[in-house]
Image (cartoon, rainbow, N blue to C red):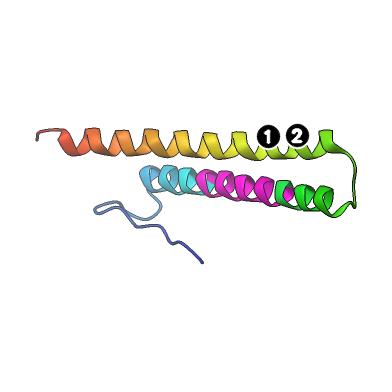
Amino acid sequence: MEVRGVSPVGVRAGSPLQQALSGFAEALERAVRSADELQRRADAAAAALADGRTDDVHAVMVAMEEASLALQLAIQVRNRLLESYQELVRMQV
């Protein structure tokens, strides 16, 4: 599933604000893809351990912990973004 960004109203293409927004969106996309990849690796490592293809419990636990930390980081970033949005909505103009 491809998620497309929403263009801000009143922001011209090629403007510094537009460049900053696209840079942030790209960084966020890379972070989400990285967290997803870590989760897939952890799942594969756990399946290999369960199937008996590996006996390296340490490597499996490290992979699972990395995936867990990446997910926790993503959740915290989302929470901060949501809090920032809510603060903007509460501002009086």
Q: CA distance from mark 1 to mark 2?
A: 5 Å
Question: Of 17 and 87, which appears nearest the observer?
Answer: 87
Check whether the beta carbons of the residues at disc 1 and disc 2 lie within 8 A of each other. Answer: yes
Where is residue 48? Give x, y as percent: 83, 52
Q: Which residues are magenta?
A: 27-41
Judging from the image, what secondary structure is the residue with disc 2 in?
helix
Above or below, 66 against 23 in this view is above
Q: Residue at x 45, y 49 (%)?
A: 22
Q: Is residue 33 magenta?
A: yes
- Disc 1 secondary structure class: helix
28 vs 92, left or right, is right
Q: Which residue is mark 1?
A: 65
Q: Amino acid at mark 2?
A: Val
Queried whether the magenta region covers residue 75, the answer comes back as: no
Whole-percent x, y for residue 86 in the image = 24, 37
Q: Residue at x 61, y 45 (%)?
A: 35
Mark 2, other Cα within 10 Å: few <14 / some 14–19 / many ≥20: few
Q: Which x, y percent locates residue 8?
A: 30, 52
What residue appears at the point 25 percent right and 54 percent down from the top-left corner? 9
Number of the label disc, if any, that sits on residue 36: none
Q: On the rendered image, what quadrant is the C terminus found in?
A: top left
Q: In the depicted view, which residue is nearer to us: 32 or 16? A: 32
Q: Disc 1 marks which amino acid? A: Glu
As drawn, which residue projects farthest toward the bottom?
A: 1
Prevailing SS of the magenta stretch: helix
Give the quarter of the image for residue 82.
top left
Judging by the rendered image, the residue that carries numbered circle 2 is 62
